[in-house]
C-alpha cells in the first residue's frame, strides 16, 4: 500500500493506493499525528510520499517518524522537464501533470488546476513538460478587488446574483470575477486547441465545478489528479 499526502495552500489531502487503485482518501485542514497513526494502523502501508506548497517545518517530526519521501525539485520524475527555472516550479503542478499522464500517456496534455490559483501546465506527446501559466484563483480575485481599492467591498460569490450586466456593486463584482475567469479559462483552452489538434485537457482543483467544463471538447475532470501523480512518482522512485 502507498500513502500519499498533498499539503496545499488551504487543505491537506491524503490518499491510500493499492497499486494504481485509490482505496481510501480524506481531506483535513492540517496534517496531524492522529490521522497518520490511524491510516498506518488501518492499511498495510509500505511506501509514502508527501508534497507541500507551503513551509512544512511544523510537520518535520511527523514526516521523519513515518519516513515519508519528500517530493522536491531533485526527485527523479517519469518525464523530462524543459523549464528554465525548475527550482521554482511548483511541485503540485508537476504532480498534477504526472497524474494526467497516467490517464493519457503519449498525448499532448493541458492540465488545469482551478484552486487558490489557476495553473495551466502543458506536457507534449514526447513526454516533455514545457511550462504553462499561473493566474489568480476565484477567491483571490474577490479579495484583490477589496484589498487594492478603498470602496469596493469584499464579496462572497452568490450564484443567484450572477448576471452579465451587474446592476449593483456586488453583482458587478460577481459578474467581473466569474465571467472574466470563465472567459480566461475557455480562451486559454481554445488557444491550446488551435495549436495542438489532438490535445487532451484534464481539469482538477476545488473550484473546477464552478464553471461549465463538462466532458466535451476533450475535457476530462479528475479531483484526485495530484494524488494520482504523487502515487506514480512514488512508484517510479521505488523501481
Image: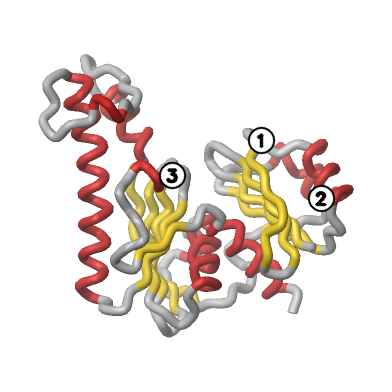
Q: Quadrant of residue 4?
A: bottom right
Q: Pointer 1: what residue?
A: 30
Mark 2 Cα shell of 10 Å, populated few (<14), some (14-19), many (≥20): few
Horizontal side, residue 143 vs residue 25: left or right: left
Q: CA distance from mark 1 to mark 3?
A: 17 Å
Q: Pointer 3: what residue?
A: 115
Q: Pointer 2: what residue?
A: 64
Give whichever of discs 1 and 2 has the lower sequence position. Answer: 1
Q: Of helix, strand and loop, which one carries label 2?
A: helix
User: Which callout, 1 or 2, points to the residue nearer the camera?
Assistant: 1
Q: Residue at x 48, y 66 (%)?
A: 97
Mark 3 Cα shell of 10 Å, populated few (<14), some (14-19), many (≥20): many
Q: CA distance from mark 2 to mark 3?
A: 29 Å
Query: Residue 167: horizontal and vertical position, in percent?
Result: 11, 21
Q: Nearer the viewer, residue 88 or 194?
A: 194
Q: Is residue 157 above or below residue 150?
A: below
Amino acid at each position: 500500500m502507498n500513502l500519499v499526502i498533498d499539503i496545499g495552500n488551504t487543505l491537506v489531502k491524503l490518499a491510500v493506493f493499492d497499486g494504481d487503485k485509490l482505496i481510501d482518501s480524506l481531506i483535513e485542514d492540517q496534517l496531524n499525528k492522529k490521522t497518520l497513526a490511524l491510516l498506518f494502523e488501518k492499511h498495510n502501508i509500505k511506501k509514502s510520499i508527501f508534497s507541500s506548497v507551503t513551509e512544512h517545518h511544523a510537520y518535520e517530526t511527523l514526516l521523519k517518524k513515518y519516513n515519508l519521501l519528500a517530493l522536491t525539485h531533485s526527485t527523479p520524475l517519469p518525464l523530462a522537464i524543459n523549464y528554465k527555472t525548475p527550482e521554482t516550479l511548483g511541485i503540485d503542478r508537476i504532480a498534477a501533470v504526472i497524474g494526467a499522464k497516467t490517464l493519457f500517456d503519449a498525448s499532448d496534455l493541458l492540465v488545469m488546476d482551478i484552486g487558490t490559483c489557476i495553473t495551466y501546465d502543458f506536457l507534449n506527446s514526447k513526454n516533455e513538460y514545457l511550462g504553462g501559466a499561473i493566474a489568480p484563483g476565484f477567491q483571490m480575485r474577490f479579495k484583490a478587488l477589496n484589498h487594492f481599492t478603498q470602496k469596493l467591498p469584499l464579496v462572497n460569490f452568490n450564484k443567484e446574483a450572477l448576471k452579465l450586466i451587474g446592476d449593483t456593486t456586488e453583482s458587478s463584482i460577481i459578474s467581473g470575477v466569474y465571467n472574466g475567469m470563465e472567459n480566461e479559462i475557455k480562451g486559454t483552452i481554445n488557444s491550446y486547441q488551435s495549436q495542438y489538434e489532438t490535445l487532451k485537457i484534464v481539469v482538477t482543483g476545488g473550484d473546477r465545478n464552478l464553471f461549465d467544463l463538462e466532458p466535451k471538447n476533450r475535457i476530462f475532470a479528475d479531483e484526485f489528479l495530484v494524488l494520482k501523480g504523487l502515487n506514480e512518482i512514488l512508484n517510479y522512485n521505488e523501481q
